[in-house]
Amino acid sequence: MAANTIEERINRLHSTGIIDMHFDLPMDLYEKRTRPNVLATEFLSEFEAGGIGLIGAAIYIEDRYLPDRGLQVALDQVARLYTEAHQSKRCVVCRTHAEIWRALDSKKIGFLITMEGVEPIGDDLDLLRAFCELGVRVIGLTHARTNAAGHGGIFAAKGSSPEGLTPFGRGFVRECEKLGIIVDLAHINPAGFKEIVDLTTKPLIVSHTNSRKFYDVERNISDEQIKMIGERSGVIGINSVLVSPEQKGSTLDCYVDHIEHVASLIGIDCVGIGFDFFEFIYRQWPESKKKWMAEKLTTPHFIPDLANHSHARNLTRRLIERGFSDEDISKILRGNWIRILEEIL
Ligand SMILES: [Zn+2]
């Protein structure tokens, strides 16, 4: 196919705005809170180059703020996101599917506030209601840590806690369903994953993960877990930083292999994007913190041509080259997430 035709197809597929369900934006905005217009000066051009329409903006609290400052830092992250979105004039925080459609139709970049680990909520269910009122619409119970709700999946093939959710965690999941908050199974350990599936009735998501077929750690998900999401007509967002245990295997083609694998097990309607672009934060860290991450979690392997939002078109180009139809690409880039958001929000 002629190069210009491929570029035209990419333009068309990105013209309606693509959806990335996981980005650690709020923590970076918080760390840079003394600077004005961080969103506009450091992120907007990449969002625009990638044709980004909606981003899952994840509240995440680093260990150094826990336990005492978790709630405060989370509230500050939410405040920074609203302030920055307002200042940029091009971005808007969305709380309902109607607001998401309005953002997409007006070519704005929408943010859906998500939470990665319930540490800010502690064990106080009333705070879940409060965060819901602030606009949080997707919550994953844990990161890699153990907290009041449950245990995270570790970065090894086995060894995560055999325990499922705590009584608080079970009540938390039920309350999320009542409030219309989407439960995100990214990071939770296998026992907790199964328990959430059993406790809930609505479609479930894994906002950002990879298949254990290619990178066998409990932080990623097995074929059996992928099928559990498929049975519930959920969506799995493919992560860009854990596609392979090795840097040389961390390629755009491997990212597409993960998409193909999930689609082969549960269908093209259940796979989306959760890029988890993290390199910009990792780059800012001192060597000591990178070493800490390598020892405690893992060394992330960034895909050179899929490392930030301006690279999103590279993925679409590769999907075209690998023979995906426009209809299927549009489901992966946006349509499948839209289906879930319309159903729950
Ligand atoms: Zn994560």
Image: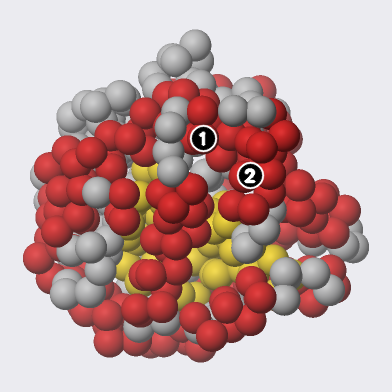
Q: Residues within 10 Å of mark 2 (few under 14, many from 20)?
A: many
- Counting from the top left corner in percent of width and height, residue 70 is at 52, 64
Check residue 10 in the rendering and tell me which mark sits there, or answer none.
2
Quadrant in which residue 215 is drawn = top left
For residue 25, say whether it is visible. no
For mark 1, does the 10 Å Cα neighbourhood hold few (<14), some (14 to 19), or many (20 or more) residues? some
Disc 2 residue: CB within 8 Å of ligand 1: no
Res 140 quadrant in image: bottom left
Q: Amino acid at mark 2?
A: Ile
Q: Where does the image place residue 193, in percent across and percent down from the top left?
A: 19, 54
Horizontal placement of 217 versus 246: left or right? Answer: left
The residue at 87%/53% (across/down) is 41
Q: Residue furthest top?
A: 248
Location of residue 16 in the rendering, given as x and y in whole percent from the top left corner: 63, 63
- The residue depicted at 59 percent of the width and 28 percent of the height is 1
> Are the residues flagged by discs 1 and 2 in contact, CB closer than 8 Å?
yes
Q: Position of residue 219 (x, y in %)?
A: 31, 39
**Compared to 202, does 263 lie above or below?**
above
Residue 100 appears anywhere in the view: yes
- Answer above or below: position of 160 versus 245: below
Which numbered circle lies on residue 320?
1
Scheme of image coloration: secondary structure
Q: At label 1, which amino acid type do we have? A: Ile
Residue at 44% from the left image edge and 53% from the top image edge: 327
Determine the CA span between mark 1 and mark 2. 9 Å
